[in-house]
Structures are given as structure tokens and as C-alpha cells.
Amino acid sequence: MPNQFNKLPIVIDASYLKPNVTSDMIASRKEKISQIDGQLRSGNHPGSDFTGWMKPDQILSADEMSRLKATAKRLRDETDVLLVIGIGGSYLGARAVIEALADDPDKVVYAGHNISAHYMTRLKKQLAGKRVAINVISKSGTTTEPAIASRIMRKLAASSKHIVATTDSKKGALLQLAKTEGYETFVVPDNIGGRYSVLSAVGLLPVAYAGVDIDALVSGAAKCAGLCSNADPISNPAYFYAAARNVLYHQGFSIEMLASFEPRLHFMAEWWKQLYGESEGKENMAIFPASVDFTTDLHSMGQYIQEGRRILAETFLIIDGGEPSLKIPTDADDSDGLGYLAGKEVSYVNSKAYEATAKAHRDGGVPNMTIHLEKLDAYSLGALIYFFEIACAVGGLMLGVNPFDQPGVEAYKKEMFKLLGKPGFESAEDQCLEPKFVHF
Amino acid sequence: MPNQFNKLPIVIDASYLKPNVTSDMIASRKEKISQIDGQLRSGNHPGSDFTGWMKPDQILSADEMSRLKATAKRLRDETDVLLVIGIGGSYLGARAVIEALADDPDKVVYAGHNISAHYMTRLKKQLAGKRVAINVISKSGTTTEPAIASRIMRKLAASSKHIVATTDSKKGALLQLAKTEGYETFVVPDNIGGRYSVLSAVGLLPVAYAGVDIDALVSGAAKCAGLCSNADPISNPAYFYAAARNVLYHQGFSIEMLASFEPRLHFMAEWWKQLYGESEGKENMAIFPASVDFTTDLHSMGQYIQEGRRILAETFLIIDGGEPSLKIPTDADDSDGLGYLAGKEVSYVNSKAYEATAKAHRDGGVPNMTIHLEKLDAYSLGALIYFFEIACAVGGLMLGVNPFDQPGVEAYKKEMFKLLGKPGFESAEDQCLEPKFVHF
């Protein structure tokens, strides 16, 4: 392994990008990327007010970090479960880390990320009789989904000491409510957008409650920030990833699938989909981010990937080591034909399934690369988070869009406010929607 | 509502397919579809040995159905949890129905659908101390993933009376094992492929264990089979759906997203992805099936859908009624600005979110249609299952592929068997994979 990566727990294997992507094509992006890197570091680019995430260990002050850990510990000691109320960037990063790393991810549950009466009714039943802590996460406090869930669920907390608000530092409905009710508060930073906020208090409080080592998480990210600060896409793996995606996109690959072989990475892929889809999907451009959980989805989406329309590229997210030992038992009756695997580690078989899949998909016309994580722990996952964030920022700027805004998210909200008669959104039109037709 | 649909709990709203899809375009598919319909009903088409699902109420005999219900009841009475061991079509249909309809979906858990040591280790811990029933579902009994899980997990059942095998009626490893060990068995029919098997014993036993009314499920499907037997795509909603997808595909729409506003439909979308991806994704063709859970994913994928590359079409899956009553509480302090919704039903707000989203996405260039379900119960869901199955069969035949095979799924398996040294798959080559490179 080249020296320049010897401290980064991430390695990219790009051998199956060939022949679609060559080193010459990556090198052809070098000047552009170097320019973007300079802009990012000097704050001279669209969205330059939103790069607070680039210094992961400076997002919270030491004092704030201590207070956050103390609060997480107190809530953990005094309650059975944490209910996180937030949507999009206000919950997805925390959930991704918790599902990937927590010993018991079920100690954290979620609301405010949908408008389902069925979901909330069932959740209320599940929480009955439990000591519930609540973390409401919303910069404004007026986002419809979490505001509804907050009204319905807040009463489940035993006392206001078990409710924490993560919100704007100076203004807004949730800050006001917190002051009135005496909730402890943490800050949603002004210079970090939702989808980049997992290493701020937005993500760290729920993650700490779940028992994950948030110092290691942040320090992995900070290490990655240091090691991925080289502007050359051939030697900087994050910029290599950005360059390779850009090449694939311009060759007409419409879809990038993030594929893992570990179910506990499912929500990392969901987080990745928001990060890339929301950062790049503008001005009628960008690769559509999709995800698959293998080998599960080899038995559902596998046929399409192998032989369907050739518009797919694939990025494998692979854990190289540190998985629990679990051996395939010997069976005197070998009728299942599995005897050749008896005594083998399940993780060994899984790693061969990955290698076989990467080869089969390449052979079927799906260019793919692999992001190898040394192992899945807080340090490595922190590094991976930063890796994806910086590559995404560079990728969006390569497309010429602002990777830190999300103007399109307002469209459905505006229509919804009209339909619901929200003050200020009343429509002069009789009816926003055409009458409903069967067929046409 | 036209009379011909008055007993079908499904209505399609196609108004937002315009201007991309017009009734003339649908009508232009009429002759082709009529021909395919004739072939399907006379068994004169590729894959004609695999249409057993077309008569949903004849898949199981009355005696088999009674035995299945009795077994489900006995297992339910004698155990706390059912572990389903299966992959792809051998578990996804059951899971889709259980998550959508069961009062307590957590009474059924899953293994054999991945090769994760972490997943299986955690699951074993969760099951410790519980009375576990096991349903191993595999036609051959030699599929790698369920065979591994079966070896590891089988011992968790208290006795062989709590293990049921759903497998081939005449031969195979699992049938042999069941005979040796004295497991009760149910049949994976010869004339129904995995992804179409949810209404056979494959799906029905777990679904019955979960407490869902399987008679209603089957009778909804049978009703739909009767009502969707008209060959005209203008008046048969299933054929309309097939025709509309075909038009969109030929216009260059590469991705169809199935979008619901109910989290409990998440696995119905996963089932749908297998059904369509595996049936159609052949010979470098077909729409890529993706799914989103709204409003959750409006805050992650919403930006891309609204403004990204214009290759998306969308199908909403909407529940029109019967949702639980849950009202948005009044709050004296109206700082969250939600006062205009106080006293309103959450399901009402959700329905407006859907209407707003459909309009916003149409305005943003995403043609979309909506499949309305009268309500979400076993009868309606059974109808929906058949609706999707028949539309998929017709859609695949319109593309000119066999919608009942899945040759591409073997590709990764062959590579994996080589790498693992499975007898009969040894490779003469030193190494199947190229050496691993960092970058290139």
C-alpha cells in the first residue's frame, strides 16, 4: 500500500473501472480539481458559507463537546430509549452511524421523518411504559414533519429535563420553545447544511446516547481531512472518487449504486444517497444515487444489474476485517452440499461473495470500484464520512452546481402549504390539483 | 368511477402522465397487449411453465390451505417468534405482506438472506431465551445463503416439531433433511417462480403465523384476476400500467420510482423491485426499478427528483382510507406555526403531502401516476399483488423477454463457487480476480 495512505483506514480499488475509466481520464480532471480544491480552501465558490464541516474537530468547542457527552450520559442513565425527532439531514446521519456501530441500535427510535398516523400510533404503543428521552432536531422548529411529531410525542418524556433541543443558536421557534419549557439546547451550526451535519451536535448527541465513541468518530474524520487535502485526484482517494464518478457520468452512466455486504451499513447508504442526490441533483444533471444490500439484493436486483439496461455503475463499500467470528458448522448429513465450507468463517464466505460479485458485474458491463474500510469502527466510519463529504463537494463543483443548497426541496412544501391553507400560502386558484381521473 | 372497477379496490390516476403519455399512446399498445394476453391465457409464450400464480385461489388445494392454517396456528400458540430462512422470492413477499399488515411484524424475523456474521450473531442473541419456530424456505435446499443460515440457526428451535420446510414436493436436499428429521413440509410449486410465489405456501405460512387473514389475501388476488382479465389496456388498469411503463421506457425514462407515504409499505416496494427488475432486466433492457419512502425521502432524494437528470418516472402507491385516527394537538404556544393544523387528522395532512408532491414532481418534469388502494387490508393487498404480477408478466412479454426466468442471477454464484472451491466449480486458473490495486 503506498505510503501516502498508511494512516487512512480507507483504500480504493479501481481495477474494475477499466476499460471505461482510465488513469488518463482521471488525470485529465486534475487541473479542474486542483482549481476547485483551491476555491474550497479559500472560500471562493458557490455556497462558501457552508463549509464548516471541513474542519470536523472544530465544529464543537471542547466545552460544548464535554457538555454534549455529559448530557448523553445523563439521558442514557435516566432513560430506556431516545426518541430522535428530525427529518433529512437532521436524523439520517445519526441513524447511519448508530445502525452501523451501536451495540443496541434499538435504544434510539425515530419520528418526525414521516406523516404516518399508523407509524406514530405504533411507536406510541411501543414506548408506553418506557422512560423516554427526546431530542428534537430542527434549525427552524417549523418544518412540518418534526413539528407535528413534536406536538404528538413530546408528552412521552417524563420531564422537561429529558427533552433536548438541537436548533439555531439565536432564533427560531424551537429555541423559543426550549427557553419557555427549560429544555437543554445544542446548536445546529450556521455554516453547515443538514446533510453535512452528522459530526455536529445534530448527529453527535444521538450517536453518543447510543454508546458510540464520538471522539474516535470525529478524530477519524479529522485524520481523513488531513490526509485527503492533496489536490491531485490520482493520489488523493477522495478526489479520485469524485473524478471517477465525473467520468462515468459524462459517459452516460445514469445510476451509481452503493453496494454493501453488511446490513448494518444500510443507513450509511441512505445517508450517502441524500448527500449526493441533494448536493448534485440540480439543473437537470447528475448521477442518480441508488443503493443495494448484498447478498440480499443479488436475489432481487441482481438480474437487472447483471443483464438489464447498461446505465449502471457500482461502488462497493467493503469491510476488510474485524467482523465477529462465526463458523459454519459441520453437519454429518451433508445433504445441503455445504460441507466444503464447514469450519469456514461466515465473514470469509461473505468476502468471497463480494469478490465474485465485483467480477461478475464487471463482466456484465457494470464498471465498479470498491471503497475498502480496514474495519468498521468509529474511527474508520468518521474517516469515511469525511471522505464522502469532501468528494461530494468537489463532485458538485465539477458539475458547476452549488453543492450546499437544495432549492428543489421547497417545491412540494409550497404546494402542500397551499393545499393545507397555511397562512401566507393561500392560493387564489380554486383548486391546485386537477380533478382525479381514472386513467385519463 | 366507471362500473367495470366497482369491485376492485384499486384505481389508477394517470392525470400527471400527461403530456408524456397520452391515451392514444396507450391505445397504440392495444393490439400487442391483446395478443400477449391471449398467449398468457393459452400458455403460448416464453416461460409458459411458470404461470401457476395466475389462479391465486388454486395454488393450494383446500386441504393444503387448512393444514397450512392449522400449522401456523400451532406454531403461533407454541412459540414466541418465527424465524424465516430464505432469500429473494423465498422471503421477500412474506416480509412485504407482514410489514404492511401484521399487528406486530416483529414476531417474524429473517435470516438466510445475507452472509453477515454480524447480523447472524446479533440475531442469535436477540432470540436467546425465546421459543423459536423456524420456516426454512428453499426449493433446492442448496442455495448458499439459506443453507448457511440453516446450519447455524436450526438448533435454536426447541424441537423438530417447530421447524417447517417449504420446498420441492418430490426431491432436493431440504426435502431429504425434512424427512430425516421429521419436519413438516409445504410445497414450493413447480409452476411458480420465486418472485411470483407470495400466495403459495412460500409466503402464506409466515404471513399466517403473523396473524394476517390469508383467505382475504388470496381472495383479493383472485378477485383482481377476474377483474383484470380484459385485454384492453384502456379499461384494464393492470394492462394500463404495463402499457404506460412501456411508453415511458421507450421515451427514455430510465428509472421508475415506486413511492409510498406509508413506511409500512417499504417492503412492498422491495418486493416490487424484485418482481420488475428480475422479470424485465434482460438483454440490456428495461426500466431500473427504485423506491422511495415519503415524506422521509423528500428530504433526501427530493432535490434530485425535483431538479436532477430528467430520466425519472414515478408511481405513487397511495392508501385512500382506513388509517388510524391521530389528531394534531392544539398547543397554546403556537411558536411552531402549526396552529393552522391543530385538530386535523395526521392522515389528512399526509394525503395533502402526497397530492402536493405529485403536482410538484409533474411540474418539475417527472411524469407520474398513482395507484390508489381503497384501504390497506389483506383483501386490497392481495388484489395489489396480483395487479403487479399480471402487469409485470405483460410488461416483460412486451419487451420480448421471458418474464419468468433469471439467468443473470447465476453469474455471481458461479464466480463465488470458483473462489470458494466448491466441488465441480474448481477453476483451472490460478486466480479468478486480478490482483487488488489501489486506484489502478
Image (tube, coloured by chain):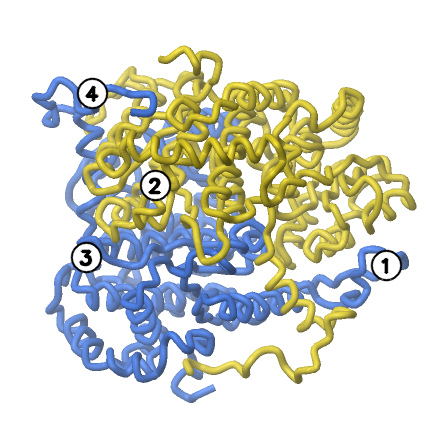
Chain colours: A blue, B yellow
Mark 2 highlights which residue?
A: B247
Check disc 2 and report its element: helix, strand or loop.
helix
- Is A107 on the left or on the right of B314, as rendered? right
Q: Nearer the viewer, mark 3 or mark 1?
A: 1
How far separated are the C-alphas under marks 3 and 1?
A: 61 Å
How packed mark 2 is, by other alpha carbons closer than 10 Å (few <14, some 14-19, many 20 or more), is some
How far separated are the C-alphas under marks 3 and 2?
A: 45 Å
Given residues A380 and A235, the one toward you in this image is A235
> Which label's residue is closer to the chain start, 4 or 2?
2
Mark 1 highlights which residue?
A: A334
Percent position of residue A102, x then y:
52, 53
- Is B329 on the left or on the right of A15, as rendered? left
Marks 4,2: beta carbons within 8 A: no
Given residues A336 and A264, the one toward you in this image is A336
Given residues B165 and B57, the one toward you in this image is B57
Tag 2: residue type? Val
Q: Nearer the viewer, mark 4 or mark 2?
A: 2
> Which label's residue is closer to the chain start, 3 or 1?
3
> Which label was assigned to residue B85?
none
Tag 4: residue type? Tyr
Check disc 4 and report its element: helix, strand or loop.
helix
Q: Which residue occupies 79% across, 38% down?
A: B164
Mark 4 highlights which residue?
A: B340
